[in-house]
Image (cartoon, helix red, strand yellow):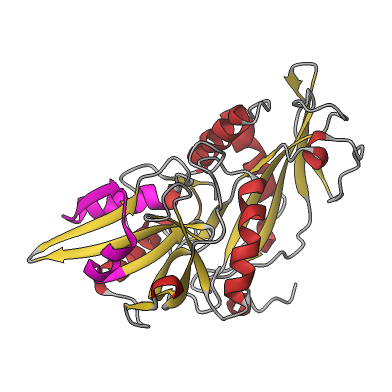
Amino acid sequence: MNIDWKSLGFHYTETDTIVRCEYHNGAWSEPVVTTDKTVQMHLSATCLQYGQQAFEGLKAFRGADGRVRIFRMEENARRMARSAEALCMAPVPVELFCRCILLAYEHNRDWLPPYETGATLYFRPLLIGITPRLGVGPARDFLFAVIPSPIGPYYPVGFHGTPFIINRNVDRAAPLGTGQWKVGGNYAASFRATEAAHRQGLSCIFLDAKEKRYIDECGAANFFGIRRDGDLVTYVTPHSSSILPSITNNSLMTLAAELGMRVERRHIPVEELTEFTECGACGTAAVISPISRVIDPDNARIYEFGDQPGPVSTQLYNALLDIQYGRTADTHGWCRVVE
């Protein structure tokens, strides 16, 4: 294996095996480890006809002590179960989900990047409806698979400022739609806006679909802003029924509170960007991507935050990575040590 780990981006690299199991007649099969990374299904499968699909993303880290940690695996399992139930799919039991992740790691451990390369081993759990249907309705049969791949930073610049642009012409998800669940349709709905932003060298911020006043998501990540009022530092992140509850954001809110910050989850009007000293996008893939500027083309405004990460974002970023890489005590029990 000849990989330049430090040059990896967030793209798929084929590993040795995947793990899969199927649901038929009300029961899940035992997991199977296979080198076959393709799926044979009927073209009328509900995942193809009606988008009945959910997925997750989580990482394994080679730690400073040489041990391997998988971050918040059970929480990903619970979030996938919520997505499945919302789309009338058979939820993957937490125990089965975790067993498949551990099998995927065990059979692909050589693909785990070394410590201090900035790369990790990423797992993509995928749940799809495979019953052939033409009439609109949910499947009775499902395929669950775990696809491992080593990855580098989601944003090419890594932990460095990324410029964003506000898009009021595309809605990622409706307030009472599927935005709070991790399903493929939310991402497909965002492509028109995100690709337009990428052509300008930017990433995209979505506003709430109802009023177009409040910040919802940063592309495929959650948003946060940092306010300073004297000695009081506040971590502010959107509260909305149309954004995905990020496990990374949840972890950052916990760490922010422990570091003495006030944490607020609420509507964030666009004009409040003037009151933030730092802003960022956060998620499993990005961890934290500091926002350098936000362009609001409809109001001819640019909100500047600087190309370099701010001190609070840096503190939170390092605090989370220290837990993931075993450089500090995992007092929350977030990591599963697997080696």
Q: Which residues are magenta?
A: 249-278
Up-down relation of residue 12 to residue 28 (above or below):
below
In this view, the residue in front, 172 or 315, is 172
Q: Position of residue 194 (x, y in %)?
A: 59, 66
> Looking at the image, is 163 positioned above or below residue 126?
below
Number of disc labels: 0
Question: Dividing the image into 4 quarters, which one contains the N terminus?
Answer: bottom right
Residue, x 36% and y 77% (percent of image)?
A: 301
Does residue 237 sit above or below 192 in this rendering?
above
Q: Residue at x 29, y 70 (%)?
A: 278
Q: Nearer the viewer, residue 169 or 19?
A: 169
**Where, by quadrant of the figure, is residue 130 drawn?**
top right
Q: Give the percent coordinates (x, y) of residue 271.
A: 29, 65
What residue sits 25% from the left and 55% below the top?
256
Image-based side of 284 in relation to 101, left or right: left
Q: Residue 144 in the image: state x and y as whole percent.
A: 73, 37
- Does any portion of residue 319 appear in the rendered image? no
Q: Residue furthest left?
A: 230
Magenta stretch containing residue 292, yes or no? no
From the viewer's perspective, tell me whether residue 296 is left or right of residue 153. left
- The location of residue 126, given as percent across then percent down, is 69, 43
Q: Residue placed farthest to the bottom in the image? A: 307
Q: Quadrant of residue 292?
A: bottom left
Residue 256 located within the stretch drawn in magenta? yes
Residue sitting nearer the eye, 69 or 231: 231
Residue 263 visible (yes or no) = yes
In the image, residue 47 sits, relative to residue 284, either above or below, namely above
Residue at left 41%, top 45%? Answer: 334
Q: Is residue 53 left or right of residue 196?
A: right
